[in-house]
Amino acid sequence: MSEIVLHHCHQARSVRSLWLLYELDVPFTLVMHDFGKELRSEAYLAKHPLGRVPCLEIDGRVLFETGAITEYLCEKFESSLGRKAGDPERMEWLQWLHYAETVAVHGASLTQQHIVIFEDKDRSPMVMKLEARRLEKALEVLDAQLQGRKYLLSDFSAVDVSVGYSVFVAQHFVGLGQFKALSGWMARLRDRGAFAKALLSNGKTSIYQREFYGILN
């Protein structure tokens, strides 16, 4: 069995990798960081040149893109959470795996505007409105896919993990109440013990300290 080490920050994109590891139920070592100097140390930058998370050490090598981590882990452990080449759902699985970043990019922009930028004078209400609307449109696509379904594919898979984290972030900027199918799906994801475990802070600072961030707040 390979030694696996995951570097993670509370509520960051690395939630995807942590949640997936819990779902796979494989042994690994979790190293939690706070945002800031820890991630910019020479030792950490030698692992992840951008000083971000996730950073997965596995098989004597390092992966730091969440989509790549998801594919690699599912293939390595031959998990039913993935979809192998030739599987009828392989194409859809790949599409939703990467759609997770389509959603996340707007959530990241809004996180920057609301949380990373401290001064109101430096924030852009126009960017906030545009990104919130783009995020809303991205969620509409997910809501349509989930009509009459419990999960994005025929059953729970790693794409629910990847997209689930993106929607976890999105809900801080766009109300999910307007999306009934999407809201039901998120409720099912919240009931998963692995998701709840992946969101534990272990004493680290939360990125999202409010339940919702208004356009001008």
Image (cartoon, rainbow, N blue to C red):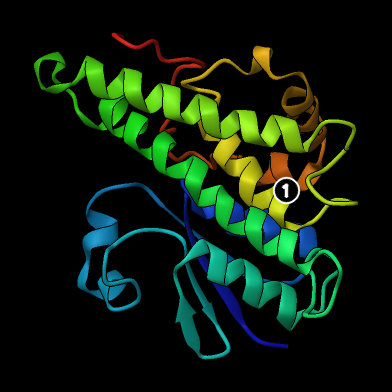
Name the amino acid type tagged 1: Asp
**Left or right of 49 in this view: 151:** right
Q: Of all residues shown, which one is farthest toward the left?
A: 121
Quadrant for the C terminus in the image: top left
Q: Percent x, y for residue 214? A: 39, 10
How many marks the image carries: the answer is 1
Q: Position of residue 132 (x, y in %)?
A: 41, 23
Quarter of image, res 112: top left
Can you say which quadrant of the picture contains the N terminus?
A: bottom right
Q: Answer left or right for 129 relative to 7.
A: left
Residue at 33%, 71% in the rendered image: 48
Callout 1: 10 Å neighbours few (<14), some, many (20+)?
many
Q: Is residue 61 above or below residue 81?
A: below
Residue 202 left/right relative to 94: left
Vertical side of 37 occupied by 208: above or below: above
Name the residue nearer the viewer: 35 or 120. Answer: 120
Determine the residue positioned at 79% across, 56% down.
157
Q: Which residue appears at 84% of the width and 51% of the height?
A: 156
Quarter of the image where one finds residue 206:
top left
Residue bearing mark 1: 160
Q: Is residue 79 left or right of residue 134?
A: right
Please provide percent x and percent y for residue 106: 41, 36
Camera-nearest residue between 211 and 70: 70
Label 1 sits on a secondary structure element that is helix
User: Looking at the image, can residue 11 be seen?
Assistant: no
Residue 41, compared with residue 110, is above or below; it is: below
Is residue 158 visible in this depiction of the protein?
A: yes
Q: Residue at x 33, y 17 (%)?
A: 129
